Amino acid sequence: MQLQLSEEMKAFREEMRTFFTTEVSEEIRTAVAEQRELTKEQIVESMRTLNAAGLAVPHWPVEWGGRDWSELQRHIWHEEMQRACVPAPLAFNASMIGPVIAHFGTEEQKAEFLPKTANLDIWWSQGFSEPDAGSDLASLRCAAVRDGDDFVVNGQKTWTTLGQYGDWIFNLVRTDPEAKKQAGISMLLIDMTTPGVTVRPIELIDGGYEVNEVFFEDVRVPAANLVGDLNGGWTIAKFLLGNERVGVAPVGATKRSLARFKELAADVIADDPLLRARIVELENELLALELTALRVVAHSTDGEPHPASSVLKLKGTELQQAVSELAVDLAGPASLAGGADDATGSALDPWARRVTPTYLNFRKASIYGGSNEVQRQIISRTILGL
Amino acid sequence: MDFSYDDEQEALRDAVRGLVGKAYGDYENRRQAVAEAPGFNEKLWQQMAEMGLLGLPFAEEDGGVGAGPVEIGIVCQELGRVIAPEPYLASVVLAGGLVAAVGTAEQRSEVLGALAGGERVLAFAHDEPGQRWSASAAGVTASESDGGWTLSGTKEPVVAGERADQLVVSAALPGGGTGLFLVDGSAATRTGYRGHDGTHAAKVELDGVTATPLGEAGADVTSSIATVLDIGRVMAANQALGAMQYSLRATSEYLKSRKQFGVTLNTFQALTFRAADMYVSLELTHSLVDWATMVVEGGDPTAVADAAARVGLQVSRAGRHIGQETIQLHGGIGVTAEYSVGSYMAHLTALDHLLGDGGHHLRGLSAAVMDHEDVDPLTVA
């Protein structure tokens, strides 16, 4: 047992800290710090800055830009990035389809897609959920039927995050309607400019348009865009969702957010023992979560996630939500002024006007990435054997 | 940064687990041990001495083993797993810790040697009626005349106070501050009783009894008491962790075996989800306990105080959650004294209030919450 980082890891942490705080655009980092929505261009610029330095996809195979880091290094990279308010590399590219293509793709697919995926030359969307297939993903119905050298796709996807920016979509489709539900699924890579693909943005309770419905009507997709085996899509989906869960606990970002609100609302907090107690509880739980994340990375071997990683997703999203809720309470009546912007000449603090949309938006966190109820199911079945 | 035990630590854990498991693996043995004074198994205490456990924290020149907080934490976790009633925290960690912290070289060697060898049981007589988890004494006062010291007043509750051969007593000094004194157990008037979790404690009345100053006579040692109490909090957290680990395992096993409506209880998601939440509490607690133990290893008293408060808050919250849910998920059998799990909750409740509960720690941390930007576990210690 040893608390301190080794000298080598301290140096690594310093290297990351220096890069993130000096090489990534100040304007972008300020926008993240103030929880403002980033433009597509800002997300692309940030990821390209990281990619140019070899810091966008460190967990990929080395030949495709990976760094062969230890789990601890990857953890430090991720934490320092959040601490410096650098937007994480686009998850659909870096954490989802990239590792899938690197693991299951053909050599042609790797050469065609991986460099563009790492550099965000292609913006990927995720075509998983459907109106009748949420947590029960395997009941999906979007169908692909072989026709000559193509598949013809018909059906609908939903909750496609940032699908309005998408160039390509990795889509789970049913290729064998007769098979048991998990056994008849495949993964197709679909160019979203193909005729028959329609994207409809969905307005959310925070007033933004973060998710979309995607409709497929007789969309012809070359058979060469099948990833892995025909009807082998469920294995790929499980691989992808397993990767999604790692790093889904935003410990660094939540800590940074809490520290920021402490500073912004220091006067309110100083006069209120109940707020101070609430902040202590949050700081303590974040400390326990951060230490749990360190224990998990220290004990992960061969990329197999530690069983406690479900704890990270579950508790991490709860704390993310709790801090966003605290922020609304700190803002008080100013939190009502969500529609006011600088142009209207609002007399209220900008931060206080932004907290409620964030609070409302973060309700998603306990739903996506395997809902927190799915995480409880994983814990009770896999870990406790119930 | 490393959260794993080395080979020697693993061997220590296995040895302690084997020893206390043999004594208390059958819960009925624990029940019998706490039924009557002294409230623990004297034979096991001797075996612990032979294994070197009673001298673990103390320097070799004082008759100890010179091990660190991680090793002591391992012992406490294993004692917690079987809720062993042996007064390890009271006698070794607290009373022994104070002798090591402020005693003269001669006192350290004489007292700690006897403690480590199992020849003498110590107790720390500190709590007083009307006091709540303070590092100083008020109700027991020390007086000096003709170069000799006497103590008067009442200490209660004193864990292992009736059985103790020697008491380490805190007392208000004539010139202000708190001093520590050694008092022969038999010199005090002691009324022993059995606590709700089986831990034996006593009222200790001191009526002008002769006492030997521990360390420099008349010196205010409040800060040393505070630090030893903080170390005690971290070790109590280790003990509570062991008790929580057992509680969740027992609950999981019970859900898999107990049948109602013709099926085992793990068929019901309302129950398994609650067990999952217990696991979340347990893992978060485990992380904080390991961390706080490593902060004690670092040795900075300010950092240790902060870590003790943080782990104390977490253990208080988690101990109540896991203790209460363990009983609820067991149903009626959980509240019987004949079955183990109810006593685990009782013991967790006792540990919660031994050195400061969650509210106590929350109050202290709240006062300082605006003094830092955030809490970085790696820059402490």
Image (cartoon, coloured by chain):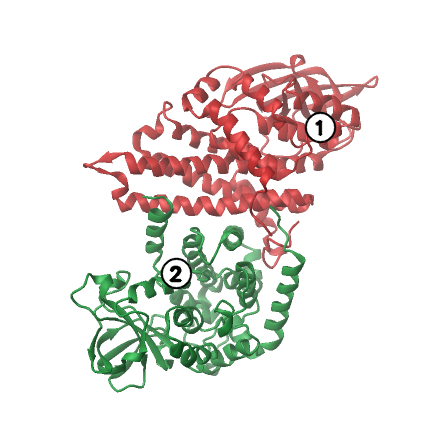
Residue B380 on image: x %, y %: 64, 51
Query: What chain does badge 2 belong to?
Result: A
Residue B172's disc is none
Question: Which chain is green in the rendering?
Answer: A
Where residue B134 sits: x, y (%)? 62, 35
Q: Quadrant of residue A53?
A: bottom right
Residue A242: numbered disc? 2
Which dot marks residue B99? 1
> Which amino acid type corresponds to the residue marked 2 in the rendered image?
Gly
In the figure, the shade used to draw chain B is red
Q: Is residue A171 above or below residue B150?
A: below
Q: Amino acid at mark 1?
A: Val
Q: Mark 2 and 1 residues: CB-CB less than 8 Å, in contact?
A: no
Give the left or right position of residue A78, taking residue B208 as reference: left
Q: Residues at marks 2 and 1, common chain?
A: no
As rendered, which of A72 and B118 lies closer to the eye?
A72
Q: Is residue B138 visible?
A: no
- Give coordinates of residue B300: x percent, y percent: 69, 45
- Mark in the foreground, 2 or 1: 2
